[in-house]
Amino acid sequence: MANPKFLVVDDSLTMRRIVINTLKSIGFEHVVEAVDGKDAMAKLMSEGADFLITDWNMPEMSGLDLTKWVRSSDRFADMPILMITTRGNKDDVIEAMKMRVNNYIVKPFTAPGLKEKIDQILKSIESPTA
Amino acid sequence: MKSAVRKKVELPRNDVTPWPARDVLDNFVKVVAEVVPLLDTVKVSLQESAGNIPKASLQLDNVTRATENATVEILDVLERMTTRMDAMSGAITRLRESEGERENALKRLDSLIAEVSGNRPGLQEQWKAFRASPGGHGSPDGLETQFAAIRADAMSIAMALQVQDITSQQIAGVSQVIESVRLRLDTVLQAFGEDRLALPGAAVVVRSSEQFNGDAEYTRETSRQEHADEIVERFKKGGDNA
């Protein structure tokens, strides 16, 4: 997937800025943002995206519910999803994986860590058996 | 009961109540008479304490907002710095390209000056001095290294600012606890009298527990991410209830 369009979802303005700046620093310039799951749904329907990066705890609609919606939609079911959250418990990670997020990052994240996870996901899409 | 106590009713001595029971009853009435004013004092104290809670919630909310505003300002500065670093890197690249042309020109001058300096011995010496000076060569490599280091430092600062999001969630957890205490105090205070005692409501909208993680941690240790990675890998391989 060349030059994917990222949708960054987090109710924290600080985190959205940091994630977006980090994406740009690692070469991903095409980024849009949403303030919660409900806003993300609307942005996906109106503008589309190729890659979803979402927080978990948000008002209106959580990242987990957003993931559930994405996976159940016809149009976005196969969209890569990376969850970035403060939740680091085993049960939380498993719950997210059961919702079929592609990978999981615990805040605070690092730029190399974000790049590694994105690269892994993109590679797995291009080579499903990888 | 309360009005009877306030009047400090004493049992008449000429009734049929047995003498020891009368003493007990008298003492009981006296104790209750002393306790009721204390209860009033406790009630007032609880009211005052509970009344301060909304102010505390508001102050916590203000802290979150202020730190978010300050964090965004810092991110703005960092972005401007990064933009300037990128612009200077571009200028360095163009300088390097022009440096190549400049060095070729200087080498041609080396040859020319060597040819003409036979009649002008001082010229060769001056030219050598110039070529030995920093301006006589000049490489931008050192500057680019410095710019890269500054860019990396700016990125480190930006990543550290994640602490604002994490602490705001911790504060939201505290606010929720404070609000639950306020509601409990409200219930206790209502038990003191027939009239519902109106307490000031929460000064801010307390976020529901789904909207924040009160157990959020800020740590630079990698163990939490490593732990999550292990769980993910195990899940993908069919373990942990996959």
Image (cartoon, coloured by chain):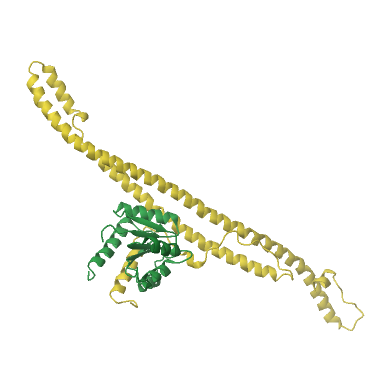
Chain colours: A green, B yellow
Query: Is residue B198 at least partly visible in the picture?
Result: yes
Instruction: Tell which of B37 and B181 is nearer to you.
Output: B181
Residue drawn at 34 percent across, 59 percent down: A6
At horizontal 11% and vertical 16% (from top left) the residue drawn is B120
The foreground one among A115 and A128 is A128
Seen in the picture, residue B210 relative to A31 is either above or below; the reply is: below
Q: Position of residue B78 (x, y in %)?
A: 38, 46
With respect to residue B120, does B65 lie above or below? below
Could you tell me residue B177's position as x and y percent?
55, 65
Which of the 4 image quarters holds residue B136?
Answer: top left
**Residue B140 visible (yes or no):** no
Q: Is residue B39 left or right of residue B138?
A: right
Q: What residue appears at the point 34 percent right and 67 percent down from the top-left corner? A: B228
Indicate the quadrant containing the N terminus of chain B: top left, top right, bottom left or bottom right: bottom right
Residue A61 versus residue B58: which sits nearer the camera?
Answer: A61
Q: Position of residue B10 (x, y in %)?
A: 87, 74
A129 displayed left or right of B177: left
Quarter holding the C terminus of chain B is bottom left
